[in-house]
């Protein structure tokens, strides 16, 4: 089992109440959502945590990172879980079309990995994930968003925040 898989399994809730599906683990081996020691490039974690836990919304980034293990435990205990469309990193520099092709090529693997969550509300994160997976997954899963939610980077943080709030339990 890879370090990414081990970290994800460590924080898998017994009872998943809301599943987020992102694109893939990052290319950089030290920035994964479930890694406890991340010092940069973790905008997805920072923004999801701030939205699911309003009491953390105004914390400094430094404080969130310092308390990441505690926040991951809370994330797990509250039934939140993040899975990726593609189980391994997508090569850096892959075009949007290339990413969507890889996501589609991995749809059956994703479906197998999330098969236990057929009745769990799911939020598809990023337009590549939404455009590639929404129709494929809708027949068997409870996809909450009917429009793409932008990845919280490159100036999309406000849009991410506004869109994700619509679906949080």
Image (tube, rainbow, N blue to C red):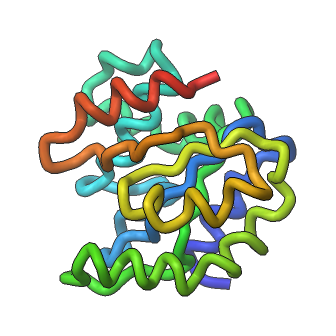
Q: Nearer the viewer, residue 63 or 22?
A: 22
Q: Nearer the viewer, residue 101 or 66?
A: 101
| Left or right: 100 as drawn, with respect to 81 | left
The residue shown at (46%, 15%) is 54
- Answer above or below: position of 52 versus 34: above
| Left or right: 63 as drawn, with respect to 5 | left
Residue 45 position in % (x across, y down): 41, 45
Quadrant location, the C terminus: top right
The residue shown at (22%, 80%) is 95
- The tally of labels here is 0
Quadrant location, the N terminus: bottom right
Residue 67 position in % (x across, y down): 45, 36
| Left or right: 103 as drawn, with respect to 113 | left
- Answer above or below: position of 25 versus 11: below
The residue shown at (59%, 60%) is 135
Q: Nearer the viewer, residue 82 or 103?
A: 103
From this viewpoint, which residue is outermost toward the left? 155
Location of residue 66 by image quarter: top left
- Answer above or below: position of 86 versus 32: below
Residue 77 position in % (x across, y down): 74, 34
Location of residue 65 by image quarter: top left
The residue shown at (36%, 19%) is 57
């Amino acid at each position: 089992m890879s370090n990414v898989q081990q970290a994800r399994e460590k924080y898998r809730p017994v009872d998943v109440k809301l599943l987020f599906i992102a694109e893939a683990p990052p290319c950089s081996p030290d920035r994964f959502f479930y890694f406890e020691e991340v010092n940069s490039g973790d905008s997805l974690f920072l923004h999801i945590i701030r939205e699911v836990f309003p009491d953390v919304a105004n914390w400094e980034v430094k404080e969130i990172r310092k308390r990441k293990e505690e926040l991951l435990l809370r994330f797990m205990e509250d039934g939140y879980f993040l899975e990726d469309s593609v189980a391994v990193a997508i090569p850096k520099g892959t075009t949007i079309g290339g990413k969507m092709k890889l996501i589609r090529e991995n749809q059956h693997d994703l479906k197998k990995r999330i098969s236990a969550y057929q009745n769990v509300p799911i939020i598809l994160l990023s337009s590549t994930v939404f455009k590639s997976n929404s129709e494929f997954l809708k027949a068997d899963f409870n996809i909450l968003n009917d429009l793409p939610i932008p990845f919280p980077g490159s100036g999309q943080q406000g849009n991410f925040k506004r869109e994700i709030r619509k679906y949080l339990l």
